[in-house]
Image (spheres, grey):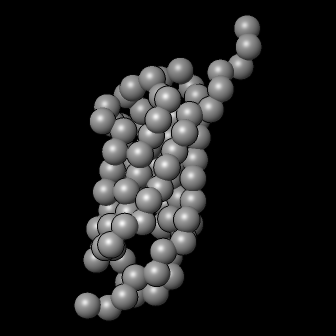
Protein backbone atom coordinates (compact mmCIF):
# COMPACT_ATOMS: atom_id res chain seq x y z
CA UNK A 1 0.00 0.00 0.00
CA UNK A 2 1.49 3.40 -0.95
CA UNK A 3 2.27 5.86 1.80
CA UNK A 4 -0.25 8.73 2.00
CA UNK A 5 0.88 12.14 0.71
CA UNK A 6 1.26 15.32 2.67
CA UNK A 7 -1.37 17.91 3.41
CA UNK A 8 -0.83 21.65 2.88
CA UNK A 9 -0.42 24.04 5.80
CA UNK A 10 -0.43 27.79 5.08
CA UNK A 11 0.55 30.59 7.45
CA UNK A 12 -0.37 34.18 6.55
CA UNK A 13 0.73 37.11 8.72
CA UNK A 14 -1.72 39.94 8.13
CA UNK A 15 -2.01 43.16 10.13
CA UNK A 16 -2.12 42.12 13.78
CA UNK A 17 -2.90 38.43 13.33
CA UNK A 18 -1.47 35.18 12.06
CA UNK A 19 -3.85 32.94 10.10
CA UNK A 20 -3.25 29.20 9.79
CA UNK A 21 -5.13 27.28 7.07
CA UNK A 22 -5.05 23.56 6.27
CA UNK A 23 -5.81 22.26 2.76
CA UNK A 24 -6.19 18.77 1.33
CA UNK A 25 -6.75 17.11 4.70
CA UNK A 26 -9.40 14.61 5.69
CA UNK A 27 -11.07 16.31 8.65
CA UNK A 28 -10.95 16.55 11.51
CA UNK A 29 -7.26 17.42 11.69
CA UNK A 30 -5.08 17.81 14.78
CA UNK A 31 -3.21 21.11 14.57
CA UNK A 32 -0.18 22.15 16.61
CA UNK A 33 1.00 25.77 16.85
CA UNK A 34 4.52 26.58 18.02
CA UNK A 35 5.82 30.05 18.89
CA UNK A 36 9.59 30.36 19.15
CA UNK A 37 9.89 26.57 19.35
CA UNK A 38 7.45 26.15 22.25
CA UNK A 39 4.04 24.53 21.85
CA UNK A 40 1.58 27.42 22.21
CA UNK A 41 -1.67 25.65 21.30
CA UNK A 42 -3.06 22.40 19.92
CA UNK A 43 -6.58 21.50 18.91
CA UNK A 44 -8.71 19.26 16.72
CA UNK A 45 -10.47 21.22 14.02
CA UNK A 46 -13.03 20.57 11.29
CA UNK A 47 -12.84 24.12 9.88
CA UNK A 48 -9.07 23.98 9.18
CA UNK A 49 -8.59 27.64 10.12
CA UNK A 50 -7.03 29.31 13.15
CA UNK A 51 -6.19 32.92 14.02
CA UNK A 52 -3.50 33.95 16.49
CA UNK A 53 -3.73 37.59 17.61
CA UNK A 54 -0.28 39.19 17.57
CA UNK A 55 -1.21 41.09 20.75
CA UNK A 56 -0.74 37.77 22.63
CA UNK A 57 2.99 37.92 21.80
CA UNK A 58 5.71 40.07 23.33
CA UNK A 59 7.15 42.77 21.06
CA UNK A 60 9.92 41.57 18.75
CA UNK A 61 10.53 38.82 16.19
CA UNK A 62 8.85 35.43 16.62
CA UNK A 63 9.17 32.15 14.74
CA UNK A 64 5.70 30.68 14.10
CA UNK A 65 5.34 27.02 13.08
CA UNK A 66 2.09 25.16 12.40
CA UNK A 67 1.91 21.39 11.97
CA UNK A 68 -1.15 19.32 11.16
CA UNK A 69 -2.06 15.62 11.00
CA UNK A 70 -5.31 14.46 9.41
CA UNK A 71 -7.40 11.36 10.13
CA UNK A 72 -5.48 9.39 7.47
CA UNK A 73 -2.16 10.09 9.19
CA UNK A 74 -1.00 12.51 6.51
CA UNK A 75 0.90 15.50 7.80
CA UNK A 76 2.18 18.90 6.76
CA UNK A 77 3.75 21.97 8.24
CA UNK A 78 4.80 25.54 7.58
CA UNK A 79 6.85 28.20 9.34
CA UNK A 80 7.28 31.96 9.17
CA UNK A 81 8.82 34.78 11.18
CA UNK A 82 6.72 37.74 12.29
CA UNK A 83 7.70 40.99 13.98
CA UNK A 84 5.30 42.31 16.63
CA UNK A 85 5.39 45.85 17.97
CA UNK A 86 4.44 47.26 21.33
CA UNK A 87 1.08 48.99 21.47
In the picture, measured across the screen, residue 24 lies left or right of residue 2, that is left
How many marks are shown on the rendered structure? 0
Residue at point 32%, 67% (across, down): 17
Residue at point 33%, 50% (across, down): 50
As displayed, is residue 40 above or below residue 83?
Answer: above
Place residue 12 in its image quadrant.
Answer: bottom left
On the image, the x and y values in percent for residue 5 come to: 65, 26
Place residue 2 in its image quadrant.
Answer: top right
On the image, the x and y values in percent for residue 80 come to: 55, 65
As displayed, is residue 21 above or below residue 84?
Answer: above
Which quadrant would the C terminus be assigned to in this image?
A: bottom left
Residue at point 39%, 26% (across, down): 27
As displayed, is residue 42 above or below residue 13?
Answer: above
On the image, the x and y values in percent for residue 52 come to: 33, 62
Q: Nearer the viewer, residue 73 or 13?
A: 13
Q: Does the image show residue 63?
A: yes
Of all residues, the one furthest to the bottom in this rendering is: 86
Q: Nearer the viewer, residue 66 or 82?
A: 82
Q: Does the image show residue 40?
A: no
On the image, the x and y values in percent for residue 58 come to: 38, 84
As displayed, is residue 11 above or below residue 49?
Answer: below
Of all residues, the one furthest to the front in this rendering is: 14
Of all residues, the one furthest to the right in this rendering is: 2
Residue at point 73%, 8% (across, down): 1
Amino acid sequence: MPRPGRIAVHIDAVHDAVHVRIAGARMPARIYLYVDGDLADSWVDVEAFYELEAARLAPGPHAITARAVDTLGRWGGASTVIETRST
